[in-house]
Amino acid sequence: MSLASMRQILDEAAKGGYGVGAFNINNMEQIQAIMEAARETKSPVIIQASRGARGYTNDRFLYHLMIAATELYPEIPVALHQDHGNSPETCKSAVDMGFTSVMIDGSLEEDGKTPSSFEYNVRVTRKVVEIAHKRGATVEGELGCLGGIEDGHGAGADAMAYLTDPDQAVEFVELTGIDALAVAIGTSHGAYKFSRKPDSAILDMDRIIEIHRRLLKTYLVMHGSSSVPKELQDIINAYGGKLKPTWGVPIEEIQLGIRNGVRKINVDTDSRLAITGAIRKYMSEHPEGFDLRSYLTPAREAMKRVVAKRMVSFGQAGHAGDYDPIPLSVMAQRYSKGELKGE
Ligand SMILES: [Zn+2]
């Protein structure tokens, strides 16, 4: 089976009324953890790589690991997505490399730090849509800025400083032709999202409901949506870690989003916490150990468990067998005929 179009995965999710987790990866063990979780729960899935991950894996390792995943898990539709592309060139290189989907984050300038103008965002996003759709690849854009910084990318601003404006969102989708829209509703990248359990004063779910009301056919994306479970924090801290108390996005809020047009949910921190906790535990309990498989195996298993849980909560579980991936060449024809317009 070939890598799937993210657009197709999200079309199917919209039909079925569920969300799909987009899990970040940097190495083989993380890809294996996600694919095992997908097999166990029979889930279609999105695997995504940031610019940092692409540099870390030198792209070709990543791409060929993903091809191995499609060979070894032929029953799982899986898309390979560029997370937070900072320029049309980055996105083009991802499509050239075999990614089936790209995010262009024009909410920030090319430095990945400075909040940009609406006009700049429309211009670069439109350009990526032209490049990607011609090749059958999916495009996610972003309007508004998230809080925090991830892999050196982010305004580092207060998460409530640049929320997505619903009126502007309609205009943005019309002007760019994107498939999916990342919205800023008060979440941040990284482990430190909220200093207390989030309520509506710091997590603006009403904004998602309003954007969805106006953009029924555009798939919404929640970034920074790890739930940062206390039990994973506790394992790290029990074995010598020093995480400060923190709160993520509660699963119930994500599920509310899914009932209101959210189709892609980005999760990275939860995987990192699970892996780090398992490695710390092993190291602490086996100070004499030095075989990397002895700690990467439980680390991979811990990530698999948290990913599988998310797949069940998001509703994608059970849907892997609903469809076969459409080749990107066919998706390209459908884009060129205007069959895949959002609104
Ligand atoms: Zn993000």
Image: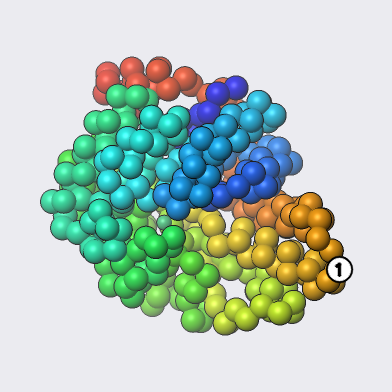
Q: Locate ligand 1 by image quadrant.
A: bottom left
When the figure is inspected, residue 147 is found, relative to residue 326, above or below; the finding is: below
Residue 263, given in percent of the width and then of the height, sits at 46, 46
244 relative to 168 in the view: left or right:
right
168 relative to 323 in the view: left or right:
left
Residue to which mark 1 is pinned: 288
Residue 70, given in percent of the width and then of the height, sits at 62, 29
**Looking at the image, which is closer to me, 164 or 111?**
111
Residue 196, given in percent of the width and then of the height, sits at 51, 81
272 relative to 297 in the view: left or right:
left
Q: Number of callouts in the render?
A: 1
Where, quadrant-wise, is the N terminus in this rendering? top right
Residue 48 in view: no
Q: Residue at x 65, y 73 (%)?
A: 233
Residue 118, given in percent of the width and then of the height, sits at 16, 54
Residue 148 in view: yes
When the figure is inspected, residue 28 is found, relative to residue 95, above or below; the finding is: below
